[in-house]
């Protein structure tokens, strides 16, 4: 940044004085407002500051692989490259076959579908067992009522 100083209108009189700027053409100081970070479809992260100014901070990189099925599972929804997957081809979102970014949404890979189906089956089996217990109890009570007659 270049600062241009102009002392032509500066005067000095007898007595105490302080040098003051009488006009300025810049913006007031601002701090980063973390609640106003945005990411556009190509992955550019834009910050808005408390003085109302916006600035691009960076861009999220996106990668594609020749064989995505060859990636090695490294965690919940984490994958690592392998010899079978090939090298990552890194670029910006929306270019070269890469997907775009959608802020404020979840992608499907955040859910382990196998685990969710297993949980659903376990819940269904539990419901079926509970309904059989109720049916059996009802039949037993009906038999007891018939024995009394």
Image: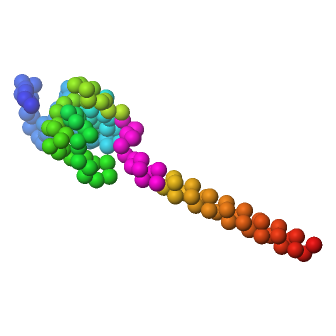
Side (left or right) of 124 relative to 7? right
Identify the image's colour scheme: rainbow, by chain, secondary structure or one colour: rainbow
Work out whether residue 58 can be spotted: no
Residue at the spot 16% in from the left edge and 38% down from the top edge: 86
- The stretch of residues the image draws in magenta is 103-118
Side (left or right) of 24 relative to 139? left
Side (left or right) of 65 relative to 145? left
Q: Which quadrant of the structure image shows residue 49? A: top left
- Quadrant placement of the C terminus: bottom right
Q: Which quadrant of the structure image shows residue 124? A: bottom right
Q: Which quadrant of the structure image shows residue 29? A: top left
Residue at the spot 67% in from the left edge and 62% down from the top edge: 132
Residue at the spot 26% in from the left edge and 29% down from the top edge: 98
Query: Can residue 133 be found in the magenta stretch?
Result: no
Q: Position of residue 137 (x, y in %)?
A: 74, 68
Residue at the spot 36% in from the left edge and 43% down from the top edge: 109
Q: Nearer the viewer, residue 34 or 15?
A: 34
Q: Position of residue 20 (x, y in %)?
A: 16, 35
Work out whether residue 93 can be spotted: yes
Query: Can residue 108 be found in the magenta stretch?
Result: yes
Q: Nearer the viewer, residue 126 or 94?
A: 126
């Amino acid at each position: 940044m270049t600062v241009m100083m102009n002392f032509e209108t500066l005067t000095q009189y007898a007595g105490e004085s302080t040098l003051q700027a009488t006009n300025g053409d810049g913006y007031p100081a601002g701090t980063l407002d973390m609640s106003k970070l945005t990411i556009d479809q190509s992955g550019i992260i834009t910050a808005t500051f408390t003085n109302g100014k916006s600035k691009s901070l960076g861009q999220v990189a996106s990668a594609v692989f020749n064989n995505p099925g060859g990636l090695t599972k490294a965690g919940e929804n984490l994958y690592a490259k392998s010899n079978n997957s090939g090298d990552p081809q890194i670029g910006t979102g929306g270019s070269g076959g890469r997907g775009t970014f959608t802020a404020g949404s979840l992608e499907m890979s955040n859910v382990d579908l196998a685990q969710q189906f297993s949980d659903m089956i376990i819940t269904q089996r539990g419901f079926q067992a509970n309904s059989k217990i109720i049916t059996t109890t009802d039949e037993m009570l009906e038999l007891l009522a018939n024995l009394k007659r």
